[in-house]
Amino acid sequence: MSETLSVVVPDIGDFDQVDVVEVLVAVGDDVSVDQSLITLESDKASMEVPSPAAGRVVEIAVELGGQVGEGDLILTIEAADLPAEEPDEKAGPSEESAPTVVEAAGPAPAASPEPRPSPSRRRPPPPAAGGPATSASPPHASPAVRRFARLLGADLTRLSGSGAKGRILREDVEAFVKEVMTGRGRAAGTGIPPVPEIDFSKFGPVESKPLSRIRKLSAANLHRSWLNVPHVTQHDEADITDLEAFRRAHLDEARERGVRLTLLAFLMKAVAASLAEFPEMNSSLAPDGESLILKRYFHLGVAVDTPDGLVVPVVRDVDSKGVYELAGELGEISGRAREGKLRPADIQGATFTISSLGGIGGTAFTPIVNAPEVGILGVSRAVRRPVYIGAGLAPRLMLPVSLSYDHRVIDGASAVRFTTHLCSALADIRRVVL
């Protein structure tokens, strides 16, 4: 036979009023014995009020964010199968119509089973990641939420709660886990809080311009690479005075072949030769992080600036092609990129990437590795300046190069050896064909 129980606030110590920071059930919910109903918090501690019996919640008398005192009604439960009580001979007969008032016990035991409570009626904002908690500042969450987070493997130090005073609620943990599982949340282990949303229109006129599809895809890829790859950039410069003279001497022949002979074609040959000399730069880290996948082919990605954003088509087997052939292929694939006509095969399979800004300007930059590649070469504008050769100065055309690399695979000494080899090959292109 069911019976109505009124659950009231238990002894709360020296406090007249405490805050209701969590309401863990809703009207109509079925609850079990010792299931947490609400969480109360004072200036010194927090406690969960457990259910004294199994049953169904028929009324809730408290509100989230409100205050209650000892003896105040929390909620009413329609209970069934109450444990039999020994009759009290001294007590007089009670009225059958009067509900039984039960004072809840203290905090629920840690080992008590906790059925899933109904979601709160308000939707919390997405959780924000925070820095690691210290022993003096643990995550602000109730014991039940801590148990729930441990069950799901969620790190509470990465969440900021949506409850009162920043308290982490069960809904915050659920939303965080859902975002991580679907890939919409922050990358695992980053601990990086999101950029705050700002209404810029209150400072002056604004205009919203949608991102192109290419920029959206590039943003996701670059963000993933930046978060997952420990980047280091090595800067160097190559003396390309003789190479530029050689290139200009063959411009007419290139026109007769119907191609535009640029520095990039020579740069690709020099890069392929350097990759062959340093195979770790032409590799990828295995997914388990325990080995390297060394690639015996040389497919170079070449960043191309288009009206819709940066794309990186791939030129295959660079090591086996001549400069004229590479120049022709570069012109063709760059044209398709700017027209938006690249095929899926045109942007797959690169082992290393070159990003050349020489036609625009700049002195140096730090390109982002295009993971799972382990290196990318940035090229800035060549500058003619005096350089000591022997005992005297001579005007030389110097090309700045910037090599970014994955420090898990490439150490600093190897990176410097790679750029030194590359710069030597560019200084004397005959090294490439020897």
Image (tube, rainbow, N blue to C red):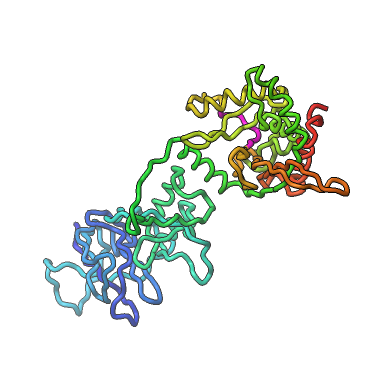
Q: What residue lies at 27% left-to-right and 63% top-to-bottom?
A: 83
Number of numbered markers: 0
* Image quadrant where one finds the N terminus: bottom left
Rendering coords of residue 396 (x, y %)? 76, 42
Q: Nearer the viewer, residue 299 or 2?
A: 299
In the image, taking residue 91 as reference, residue 30 lies left or right, namely right
Quadrant in the rendering for residue 196? bottom left
Q: Horizontally, is 210 left or right of 60 in the view?
A: right
Residue under the point 73% across and 34% down? 275
Q: Nearer the viewer, residue 155 or 79?
A: 155
The image shows residue 217, relative to residue 194, as above or below, that is above
Q: Is residue 241 above or below residue 18?
A: above
Q: Position of residue 264 (x, y in %)?
A: 66, 32
> What is the quadrant of residue 25 in the picture?
bottom left
The residue nearer to you, when weighing 402 against 5, is: 402
Left or right, 113 with reference to 222 = left
The residue at the far right in this view is 391
Instruction: Decide: is 100 above or below 391.
Output: below
Point out residue 385 in the picture as x, y percentages from the top left corner.
73, 46
Query: Considering the image in quadrants, where does the C terminus appear?
Result: top right
User: What is the span of residues highlighted in magenta in the rendered image?
Assistant: 347-354
Q: Position of residue 257 (x, y in %)?
A: 66, 17
> Along the line of sight, which residue is nearer the eye, 47 or 408?
408
Residue 409, by quadrant, is top right
273 in magenta: no
Q: Residue at x 56, y 28 (%)?
A: 334
